[in-house]
């Protein structure tokens, strides 16, 4: 079974995000990128399947600062092949990135057709979760998102997946392969790989480099303005002894007609 | 000396140790079981040091390394201190063994995993922004220069370390230390946002690759500047800079804040005029106390503070009880709880509360959150507070 995992870098919100001088984009000077958390679960799901079946795992990611660390870590965790795609503008937006990746994947020898393509179902810069379905459409694959468990059925031509719905409802689907799944989580958190293994993978492993084809960038939504949210109101802190605080709380609730 | 040469080879692995006749001297254990008896988790671990050595010696290597049992070692130096053969269990054997355990573990406990990943990515286990490492300086009552801004050599490079730089109660210690250093007229500076974790607890937890990465980054930063000595607020960093970084040629004298100030106490005494009125009991940390035998230095400082009376706990000095935070224990509380292990900091705080003291004094930044949590858990937080020795010294300073 051939599994393809798509990973990408997103802004790390450990650092405060700043709006650039143009008022329409993120200030990238101090912006640090981190791998999309859902993509880490996609890789873990692929590796769990590899642990159980005869499978090869290939990871493809657009070029970005620190992406090499992510790809070497993927090798150390057990991925068979890692590929960095150059030429995709990091600020291109979800649709342009999806289309650029879809145009690149068929040009990489041995990657397509894959039995299973796994990506994160969402990212901090793609909260609508459009990346994976757009990619599925461009590649002509069926798509299911918010997937939290994948089991390959005997014969290897279909998978059983669990998908979460609102209100704690869980759906189970049988999906014929090939398919693209948007991974939300998997049965266990992403594995930890000791740094000595990452160092060894960095010394011995190879990241393949492929250029995205150049062509017209598809029209995308244009950001007209970007600003930090402004605080509309503030919490009122009640001070004093427990009795004082309780009395004040009762007064406030009564004054608002909540008692 | 011959044995030391083997044990202090960098890049030593467990295989290397076992393959070397001199390395195998580390296994020249008489199976007396003192280590197992003194180990704070000896009653809940399957592989105490005695049994571990027995297994390694008889070739049951994979059996010894399988599973998560050895994550219960909090590297308290108790087995090391009491071994009648003087075997280097805590600082040499356990890290080599735990390195192999970590490589084999199918699932590293998530708290430990995030602490290790954060330390690699952000230089601190909490996952705080590296750009905020020196944020505490803004609230310091005295100037705390950055070495980068000074543009000249400095006598003392103070490595503040993670918990002191980021943790809110740790920052109290940082501000207090700055006041004390200032009162002593010490020519000091910090690295600010260039500072990263020294990595000792990662090393003792078996994450050797992470330790090596941090050590290389820190040595590269140190090489950019001129300074005469290192000073650090964290005993674990003190150990790393004193014993492990020198293997790569780091040759500066290293001090911890407590012994550093104790050695200059005569200069500080005229300034220590504020009456504190505290009954204090001092907790010897495993690393500063048991490993480095610095028992008198903190007590000399405490005795010099006006209105402080010192009372001792039953277990003190080399016989101190571990807070449970070393060797990765700081990030394994949930794991230990799930295993049903007792909380070591609770055991320590029970003894501290029994002294009737109103202050539990410490010299290690890990102990403040651990003991403050235990005081709350045991319902003793209304009659006892935890203070670093530096905080008490700063409090006694006249304005």
Image (spheres, coloured by chain):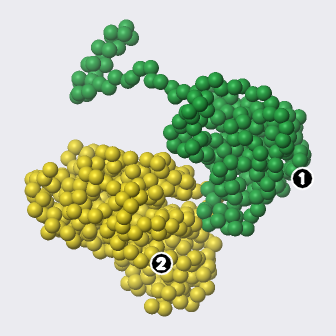
Q: Chain of mark 2?
A: B
Could you tell me residue A13's position as x and y percent?
54, 40
Which residue position holds label 1?
A109
Q: Place residue B234 in its image quadrant.
A: bottom left
The reply to whether residue B128 is visible in this rendering is yes
Which residue does the image show at 56% across and 33% down from the upper left? A21
Whether labels 2 and 1 share one chain: no
Q: Quadrant of the N terminus of chain B?
A: bottom left
Q: A177 and A193: which one is in front?
A: A193
Specify few, some or many for label 1: CA neighbours under 10 Å numbering under 14, 14-19, or 20 or more. Answer: few
Q: Are marks 2 and 1 in contact (CB under 8 Å)?
A: no
Which residue does the image show at 14% across and 50% down from the upper left? B399
Q: Element at badge 1?
A: loop
Considering every residue shown, the one lying at the far top of the view is A257
Q: Chain of mark 1?
A: A
Q: Is residue B154 left or right of residue B22?
A: left
Chain identifier, colour green: A
Q: Is residue B337 left or right of residue A20?
A: left
Which residue does the image show at 69% across and 41% down from the upper left? A90
Could you tell me residue A70's position as x and y percent?
67, 53
Location of residue B347 with respect to A120 vertically, above or below? below
Specify few, some or many for label 2: CA neighbours under 10 Å numbering under 14, 14-19, or 20 or more. Answer: few
Q: Element at badge 2?
A: loop
Which numbered marker is on residue B193? none
Chain identifier, colour yellow: B
Which residue does the image show at 38% across and 52% down from the upper left? B165
Could you tell me residue A19's position as x and y percent?
55, 33
Which residue position holds label 2?
B249
The reply to whether residue B347 is visible in this rendering is no
Q: A74 and B349: which one is in front?
A: A74
């Amino acid at each position: 079974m051939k599994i393809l995992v798509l990973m990408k870098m997103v802004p790390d919100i450990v650092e405060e995000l700043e709006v650039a001088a143009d008022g329409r984009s993120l200030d990238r000077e101090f912006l640090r990128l981190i791998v999309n958390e859902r993509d880490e679960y996609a890789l873990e799901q692929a590796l769990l399947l590899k642990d159980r079946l005869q499978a090869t795992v290939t990871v493809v990611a657009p070029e970005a600062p620190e992406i090499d660390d992510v790809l070497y870590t993927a090798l150390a965790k057990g991925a068979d092949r890692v590929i960095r795609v150059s030429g995709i503008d990091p600020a291109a937006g979800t649709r342009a990135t999806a289309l650029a990746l879809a145009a690149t994947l068929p040009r990489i020898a041995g990657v397509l057709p894959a039995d299973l393509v796994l990506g994160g179902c969402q990212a901090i810069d793609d909260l609508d979760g459009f990346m994976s379905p757009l990619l599925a459409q461009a590649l002509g694959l069926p798509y299911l998102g918010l997937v939290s468990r994948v089991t390959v059925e005997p014969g290897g031509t279909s998978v059983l997946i669990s998908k979460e719905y609102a209100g704690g409802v869980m759906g189970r689907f049988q999906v014929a392969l090939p398919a693209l799944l948007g991974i939300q989580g998997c049965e266990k958190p992403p594995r930890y790989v000791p740094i000595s293994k990452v160092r060894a993978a960095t010394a011995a492993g190879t990241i393949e480099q492929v250029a995205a084809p150049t062509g017209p960038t598809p029209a995308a939504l244009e950001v007209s303005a970007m600003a930090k949210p402004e605080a509309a109101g503030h919490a009122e802190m009640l001070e004093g002894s427990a009795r004082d605080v309780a009395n004040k709380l009762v007064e406030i609730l009564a004054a608002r007609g909540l008692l | 000396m011959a044995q030391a040469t083997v044990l202090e080879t960098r890049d030593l692995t467990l295989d290397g140790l076992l393959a070397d006749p001199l390395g195998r001297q580390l296994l020249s254990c008489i199976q007396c079981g003192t280590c197992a008896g003194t180990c704070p988790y000896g009653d809940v671990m399957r592989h105490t040091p005695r049994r571990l050595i027995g297994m390694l010696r008889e070739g049951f290597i994979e059996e010894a390394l399988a599973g998560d049992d050895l994550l219960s070692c909090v590297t308290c130096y108790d087995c090391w201190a009491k071994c009648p053969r003087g075997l280097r269990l805590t600082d040499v054997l356990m890290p080599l063994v735990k390195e192999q355990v970590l490589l084999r573990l199918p699932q590293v406990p998530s708290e430990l995993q995030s602490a290790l990943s954060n330390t690699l990515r952000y230089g601190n286990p909490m996952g705080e922004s590296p750009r905020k490492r020196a944020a505490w300086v803004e609230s310091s009552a005295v100037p705390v220069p950055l070495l980068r801004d000074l543009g000249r050599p400095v006598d003392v490079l103070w490595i503040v370390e993670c918990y002191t730089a980021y943790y809110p109660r740790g920052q109290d210690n940082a501000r207090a230390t700055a006041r004390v250093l200032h009162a002593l007229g010490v020519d000091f500076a910090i690295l600010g946002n260039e500072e990263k974790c020294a990595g000792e607890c990662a090393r003792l937890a078996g994450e050797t690759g992470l330790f090596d990465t941090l050590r290389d980054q820190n040595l590269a930063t140190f090489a950019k500047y001129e300074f005469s000595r290192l000073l650090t607020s964290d005993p674990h960093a003190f150990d790393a800079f004193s014993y492990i970084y020198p293997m790569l040629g780091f040759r500066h004298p290293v001090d911890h804040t407590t012994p550093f100030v104790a050695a200059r106490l005569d200069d500080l005494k005229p300034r220590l005029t504020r009456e504190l009125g505290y009954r204090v009991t001092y907790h010897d940390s495993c690393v500063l106390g048991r490993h480095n035998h610095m028992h008198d230095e903190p007590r000399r400082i405490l005795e010099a503070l006006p209105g402080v009376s010192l009372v001792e706990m039953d277990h003190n000095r080399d016989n101190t009880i571990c807070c449970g935070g070393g060797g990765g224990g700081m990030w394994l509380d949930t794991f230990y709880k799930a295993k049903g292990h007792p909380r070591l900091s609770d055991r320590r705080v029970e003894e501290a509360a029994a002294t009737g003291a109103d202050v539990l004094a410490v010299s290690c930044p890990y102990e403040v959150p651990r003991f403050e949590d235990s005081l709350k858990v045991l319902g003793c937080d209304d009659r006892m507070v935890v203070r670093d020795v530096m905080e008490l010294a700063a409090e006694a300073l006249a304005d």
